Image (cartoon, rainbow, N blue to C red):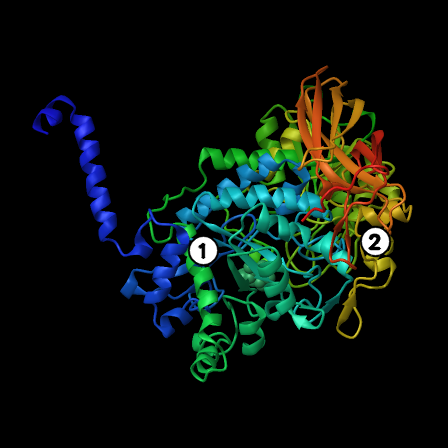
């Protein structure tokens, strides 16, 4: 050994440390031993807990944490909002800010902005930011992403979700969740399920048919569980088929835990539990936010204990809930050493900028009004309150104390430096509306400029893009239509930039006259830089709408049918499967801007679509290839969207359904072949009679295009005479 130590000092040190490590882990109790399997550790810890210690896992002990168990070295478990950044710290027993100086973070673009990128890699970059910043802030569980489907364009929380299509929402959520969780932080996908409006969210009873549930509202949650491996699910405020979602046996015990095999925890939304029996038996694991005196007054605290002691509830019921929490704790490394995390690193800033740039959607661009050529301009007018308004610290539970936030105006000023004269005018006010004096000032600015950029839209406050309330209308508020009409009359080179988290209606009187319209969403810390890069052509826009922009609210399905916002406390989803473009396409209603739509400064051509039937592949039914060519003047990215239409389905189906997409960056003149491998699921519908997915022996049209209404190539997969294949799960 001395010889070894002398001649191979490194090797001997390694051997020694391995011996010591083994000796030290052997001395550890099993639950603390990272070398042991997760279930072994969880079982060991569960055996050591007293009844009261077990109950510490089933309910909150502060606004955002459950109690620790110092005797066993179990730390408190800290949760925090939210979807697009780590919320500021609040006081232990209220939502009042703790006023700390060390809880500033990145504000990432809102989730609808992320969805507009149609870029799962961007979702991964985004999730890495959330995970690393959550670690730095000492959080164990991040309360996001939200994957509720956009059923109505006026839902106050549309900005917190991924739009109207279940497949798109699922793909984006999976990338996000895996990335967050790779940093030792659990994601909590929310709000399960049917919390698709804020109006009466605490009581509304959602009724929908079985197919609609399985084809539209469940899939993003299912993807989060089965593909994303999410460790937590948040139950929603509303009722579903008569039972509160956090007490809903069919949803929580049935679908989530039994059918999907979910092994993690169901956390209640804050103050969403109403009854001990309902919660305990209905599948809830952790009750949070209940407003009922002290923490022992929570439904799953003292009352649960009394029921356990009296024999009303078997201990196995408690043990299952606790074991789930232990799994999450162990899986996220809370008992081992974890990465320390980081805040606002250059990588985080780059990710925020990338998502904000990729998410911006160019809605209109006649006469190549954009991009602006700074060298050819002398004066630009920047008009509108959203040019200077900071949006991060809004949106209730989704609000972020951003370390920095570049406003649109700041972004433009950074970009143009002193090369251009920039004049500004507020144009309207979100508190007082638009006065003749404000319009007059805006007109003067527009007239004095070569280009007028009106930056308006909505704000992240009630009743606009904010939790707790839906919007009252689809229209642009505060007299913005009047303002834009006047500005474009004064200066035909007017660019309209909408900063919003939801679709807005656009007045034809200005839309037909302004040459360019941009949907910028709420772009987070880097919002202004991203917008300036798009306006001045440093970044070629590639975002596509993850939701339909209707011409008017009454065109939108839940409103057209009078289903929204429910009647006598019940909301029947009468539109069924026909949500978003599924409705507009099937009913032949012209949207203002269709799902999947977004322009570029270049053009793309699609050619050589081939469909190959894969008879023996267990995972794929068809291989689809198509060439996409950049035929225009600039490098840029295109999102190719693949929809499936079934020609004569046995059960009714929407006109077409998104089943694949790919984002591809192409240099000028470059062509790439894209390949899609479509599983059986892509052709199947949910048959309520057999409670399972079915693929017909039929003919399926494969439609590939640049938007749901811009199909560039079509081919058919004929399965009518095919041998039967196994049903998808
Ligand atoms: C929201 C949740 C949020 C929770 C905690 C609730 O009002 O619906 O999304 O995670 O508050 O802030």
Q: Residue furthest top?
A: 669
For discs 2 and 1, the disc positioned in front in the rendered view: 1
Image point (64%, 42%), residue name: 171
In the image, the residue with mark 2 has its CB under 8 Å from the nearest atom of ligand 1: no
- Among all residues in the image, which is located at the extreme front? 723
Q: Quadrant of ligand 1?
A: bottom right
Q: Position of residue 576 (x, y in %)?
A: 81, 57
Q: Is mark 1 within 8 Å of ligand 1?
A: no
Dot 1: what SS? helix
Q: Which quarter of the figure has residue 425? A: top right
- Which of these two is toward me, 573 or 434? 573
For disc 2, the neighbor class at 10 Å (few under 14, some 14 to 19, many from 20) is: many
- Counting from the top left corner in percent of width and height, residue 92 is at 42, 66
| Disc marking residue 132 | none
| Tally of marks | 2
- The one nearer the camera, 635 or 727, is 727
- The front one of 428 and 198 is 198
In the rendering, at what x and y percent does residue 536 appear? 67, 26
Q: CA distance from mark 2 to mark 1?
A: 40 Å
Q: Is residue 612 left or right of residue 86?
A: right
Residue 328: image tag: 1
Q: Give left or right: position of 673 versus 257.
A: right
Residue 421 at what x, y percent from top left?
A: 65, 28
**Label number found at residue 556:** 2
SS label for mark 2: loop
Q: Residue at x 66, y 42 (%)?
A: 115
Quick check: 139 above or below 198? above
Residue 449 visible somewhere in the drawing: no
How packed mark 1 is, by other alpha carbons closer than 10 Å (few <14, some 14-19, many 20 or more), is: many
Residue 144 makes an appearance in the image: yes
The answer to whether residue 445 is above or below residue 10 is: below
């Amino acid at each position: 050994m001395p010889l070894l130590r002398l001649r191979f000092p490194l090797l001997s040190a390694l051997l020694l440390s391995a011996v010591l490590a083994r000796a030290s882990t052997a001395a550890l109790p099993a639950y603390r031993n990272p070398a042991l399997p997760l279930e072994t550790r969880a079982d060991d810890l569960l055996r050591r807990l007293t009844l009261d210690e077990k109950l510490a896992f089933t309910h909150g002990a502060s606004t955002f944490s459950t109690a620790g168990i110092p005797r066993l070295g179990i730390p408190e478990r800290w949760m925090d909002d939210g979807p697009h950044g780590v919320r500021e710290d609040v006081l232990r027993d209220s939502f009042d800010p703790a006023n700390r100086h060390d809880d500033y973070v990145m504000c990432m673009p809102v989730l609808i902005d992320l969805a507009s990128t149609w870029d799962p890699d961007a979702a991964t970059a985004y999730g890495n930011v959330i995970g690393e910043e959550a670690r730095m802030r000492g959080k164990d569980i991040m309360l996001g992403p939200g994957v509720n489907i956009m059923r109505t364009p006026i839902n106050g929380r549309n900005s917190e979700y991924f739009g109207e299509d279940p497949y798109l929402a699922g793909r984006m959520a999976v990338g996000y969740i895996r990335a967050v969780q790779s940093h030792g932080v659990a994601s909590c996908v929310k709000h399960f399920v049917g919390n698709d409006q804020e109006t009466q969210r605490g009581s509304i009873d959602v009724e929908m048919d079985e197919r609609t549930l399985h084809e539209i509202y469940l899939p993003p949650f299912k993807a989060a569980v089965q593909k994303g491996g999410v460790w937590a699910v948040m139950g929603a405020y509303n009722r579903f088929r008569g039972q509160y979602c956090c007490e809903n046996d069919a949803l929580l015990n049935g679908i989530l835990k039994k059918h999907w095999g979910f092994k993690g925890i169901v956390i209640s939304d804050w103050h969403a539990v109403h009854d001990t029996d309902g919660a305990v038996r209905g599948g809830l694991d952790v009750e949070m936010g209940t407003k009922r005196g002290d923490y022992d007054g929570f439904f799953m605290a003292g009352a649960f204990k009394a029921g356990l002691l009296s024999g009303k509830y078997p201990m196995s019921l408690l043990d299952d809930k606790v074991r789930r929490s232990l799994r999450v704790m162990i899986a996220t490394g809370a008992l081992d050493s974890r990465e320390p995390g980081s805040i606002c690193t250059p990588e985080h800033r780059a990710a925020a900028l990338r998502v904000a740039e990729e998410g911006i959607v160019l809605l209109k661009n006649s006469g190549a009004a954009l991009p602006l050529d700074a060298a050819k301009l002398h004066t630009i007018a920047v008009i509108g309150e959203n040019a200077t308004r900071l949006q991060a610290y809004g949106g209730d539970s989704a609000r972020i104390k951003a370390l920095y936030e570049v406003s649109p105006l700041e972004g433009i000023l950074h970009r143009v430096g002193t090369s251009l004269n920039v004049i500004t005018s507020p144009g309207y006010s979100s508190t007082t509306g638009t006065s003749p004096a404000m319009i007059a000032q805006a007109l003067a600015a527009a007239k004095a400029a070569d280009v007028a950029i009106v930056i308006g839209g909505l704000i992240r406050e009630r009743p606009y893009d904010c939790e707790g309330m839906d919007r009252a209308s689809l229209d642009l508020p505060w007299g913005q239509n009047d303002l834009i009409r006047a500005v474009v009359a004064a200066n035909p080179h007017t660019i309209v930039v909408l900063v919003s988290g939801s679709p807005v209606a656009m007045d034809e009187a200005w839309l037909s006259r302004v040459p360019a319209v941009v949907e910028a969403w709420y772009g987070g810390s880097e919002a202004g830089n991203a917008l300036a890069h798009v306006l001045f052509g440093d970044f070629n826009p590639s975002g596509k709408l993850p939701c339909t922009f209707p011409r008017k609210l009454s065109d939108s399905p839940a409103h057209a049918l009078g289903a929204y916002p429910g009647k006598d406390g019940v909301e029947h989803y009468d539109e069924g499967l026909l949500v978003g473009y599924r409705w507009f396409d099937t009913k032949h209603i012209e949207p203002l801007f269709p799902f999947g739509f977004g322009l570029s400064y270049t053009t793309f051509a699609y050619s050589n679509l081939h469909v190959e039937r894969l008879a023996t592949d267990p995972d794929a039914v068809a291989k689809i290839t198509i060439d996409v060519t950049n035929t225009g003047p600039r490098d840029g990215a295109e999102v190719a969207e693949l929809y499936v239409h079934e020609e004569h389905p046995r059960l009714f189906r929407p006109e077409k359904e998104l089943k694949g997409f790919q984002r591809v960056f192409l240099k000028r003149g470059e062509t790439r072949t894209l390949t899609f491998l479509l599983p059986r699921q892509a052709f199947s519908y949910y048959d309520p009679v057999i409670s399972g997915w079915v693929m017909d022996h039929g003919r399926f049209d494969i439609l590939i295009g640049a938007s749901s209404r811009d199909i560039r190539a079509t081919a058919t997969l004929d399965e009518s005479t095919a041998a039967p294949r196994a049903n998808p799960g």
